[in-house]
Image: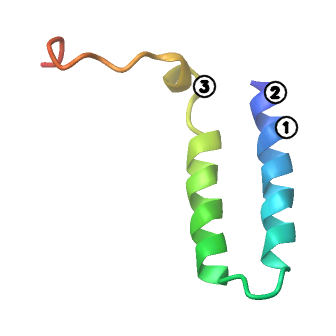
Amino acid sequence: MNDCKSVAVEVGILCDKVATLNDVDQRWIAIAKTDLQKGFWRSPSQHLRRPMSSSTRI
């Protein structure tokens, strides 16, 4: 869990650095940050769950 938080911080810093480069579309940076945040802050128990196969779904 703490490893995930540390990586999330590092990726956030990297996104901020990329945002300062010339010719970078800031809209795509914002989209990337949002999607990354969704992935990093998702419940750790959901990361560990295996997806159900189509035959076991209700």
Report the disc number at residue 2.
2
Front residue of 50 and 46:
50
Question: Left of 21 or right of it: where is 26?
Answer: left
Residue kind at label 3, given as amino acid type: Pro
Question: Which residue is more in the foreground, 19 or 42?
Answer: 19
Name the amino acid, label 2.
Answer: Asn
Q: Are marks 1 and 3 in contact (CB under 8 Å)?
A: no
The residue tagged 3 is 44
Position of the N terminus, as image quadrant, is top right
Work out how far the residue at label 1 is from the one at label 2, CA to CA, in angstroms: 6 Å
Position above or below: 29 against 37: below
Q: Position of residue 57 (x, y in %)?
A: 17, 18
Q: Position of residue 27 (x, y in %)?
A: 59, 80
Image quadrant where residue 5 sits: top right
Q: Are marks 3 and 2 in contact (CB under 8 Å)?
A: no
Query: Of callouts 3 and 2, which one flags the residue occurring earlier in the amino acid sequence?
Result: 2
- State the residue position of label 1: 6
* Residue drawn at x 58%, y 43% as measured from the top left: 39
Q: Is residue 1 above or below residue 32?
A: above
Q: Secondary structure at mark 1?
A: helix
CB atoms of marks 1 and 2 within 8 Å:
yes
